[in-house]
Amino acid sequence: MRILAIMLLATAFATPASAQDAPEAPASERPFTGFRVEGLLGWDHTEILDDDEGALLYGIGIGYDYQTGRAVLGLEAEASDSNNNGCLSDLINPGDRLCNGTGRDLYIGARAGLIVSRNVLLFAKAGYVNTRFTSEYDPGAGGPVTSAHFNMDGLRVGGGAEFAIGRNFFIRAEGRYTDYHNGGNRGALLGAFGFRF
């Protein structure tokens, strides 16, 4: 019995040592680790005014991901823009017009994912966003047009799937939703193509 106990203790201490000495998986087997840069393109819909119909969204992003086993954790930042806008008429005077539009959009956040097959990652993301909006009011009847810029902070959540193409390239499909603290929201569907270092 004493010999059996000694053998079990020896095995328990030897196993972590063996795991620690095991070589790290080659880079080709860790396609979701490292720094990345990407281009973004998609469709954006912002609840600014009732007749906002959505528009093209485009931007760039950077990030860093760390893959451990089947789990991936990462940090990311994006800068994007959109020509999304909406207008309402006859608000104060007959013939007047108020138009709001989205401008640059800055995002920083984190994501976590699970590798479901060799080159496919499913992920969820969340972070802080700051968006610039433009507001323009035309009183009609030849009156002076006034315009202003203002920024809104919000919380963005999203998720999607990323597909590794070899070790260095990837494509991604993603849906996202942004809730602004001062009211309003924004949704987008987009794709990304990027390079991982």
Image (tube, rainbow, N blue to C red):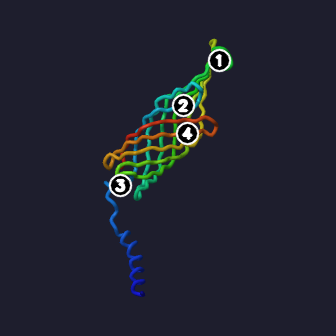
Mark with earlier residue (4, 2): 2
Report the disc number at residue 90: 1
| Residue 87 point in image, percent of width and height | 58, 23
Give the spatial CA distance, label 3 vs label 4: 31 Å
Residue under circle 2? 102
Nearest the viewer among 90 and 142 is 90
Nearest the viewer among 108 and 174 is 174
Give the spatial CA distance, label 2 vs label 1: 22 Å
Mark with earlier residue (1, 4): 1
Amino acid bearing label 4? Thr
Tell me, yes or no, whether the two marked residues, 4 and 2, touch with CB atoms within 8 Å: no
Residue 138 seen from this side? no
SS for callout 3: loop
Nearest the viewer among 156 and 6 is 6
Residue at point 47%, 51% (across, down):
112
Residue under circle 4? 178
Instruction: Select label 2 or label 3 by which is in front.
Output: 3
Mark with earlier residue (1, 3): 3
- Graded by Cα atoms within 10 Å as few (under 14), some (14 to 19) or many (20 or more), the crowding at tag 4 reads many
Mark with earlier residue (3, 4): 3
Nearest the viewer among 146 and 92 is 92
* Residue at the far bottom in the pictured view: 2
Instruction: Select label 4 or label 2 by which is in front.
Output: 4
In which quadrant of the rendered view does residue 131 lie?
top right
Residue under circle 3? 30
| Residue 19 point in image, percent of width and height | 37, 69
